[in-house]
Image (cartoon, grey):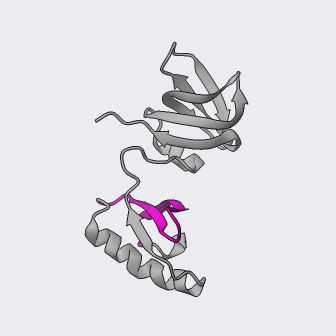
Amino acid sequence: MERNLPAGSELVEARFSGGPLLTLLVDRVDGPVDHEFCSRVISVISPALEEEGYDGMVEISSPGIERPLTRPEHFRRFVGHEAKVRTAEPVDGRRNFTGAIKSAGDDGFTLQLLEGGAEVELPFGSVSRAYLKEEI
């Protein structure tokens, strides 16, 4: 589906929200995710979804302030930003971490924790959910 998106845009997350509503979080590097852009996305995505047999409702949205981090390149892009991370299994006895993304490689990333300033290295495979924690 991502290959059908307009140039300069990225599918951040796709999820079913309440029944047959498919929510696509789409970001772009060359401008805002505004109504015009969302209309362009839906016009190119709809035929691909129909080809796959999906005929439900589709919502196109910006990732928002608490942008999900779903790929290693997201962590690399947002080095220096605060993130909240939940791991599937405990790491050092805990599953929830909040801190600044200090670095990110191919297999994992380093988070400098807000409480105490300690650093923790987390493999991408252990992350069940991660998103930016931006202050307004």
In front of the other: 42 or 103: 42
Q: Position of residue 104 (x, y in %)?
A: 58, 37
Residue visible at 56% across and 28% down?
Answer: 97
Left or right relative to 19: residue 91: right
Q: Is residue 100 above or below residue 127?
A: above
**Would you place residue 84 above or below residue 73 in this image?**
above
Can the viewer see residue 7? no
Say which residue appears at 54% left-offset and 61% top-offset: 15
Q: Quadrant of the C terminus?
A: top left
Residue 8 appears left or right of 17: left
Residue 52 visible at all: yes
Q: Going by the image, does 16 lie left or right of 32?
A: right
Magenta span includes 20: yes
Which residues are drawn in magenta? 6-31
> In front here: 63 or 32?
63
Which residue is depicted at the point 48% across and 69% down?
21
Going by the image, does 48 lie left or right of 120?
left
The residue at 43%/34% (across/down) is: 81
Q: Pinpoint residue 131: horizontal percent, then vertical percent.
A: 49, 42
Please state, as top left, top right, bottom left or bottom right, where the N terminus lies in the image. bottom right
Percent coordinates x, y for residue 123 in the rendering: 68, 37
Q: Position of residue 85 (x, y in %)?
A: 56, 35
Looking at the image, the residue that sits furthest to the top is: 116
When the figure is inspected, residue 27 is found, relative to residue 45, above or below; the finding is above
User: Magenta segment: does it hold 84?
Assistant: no
Is 77 placed above or below 99 here?
below
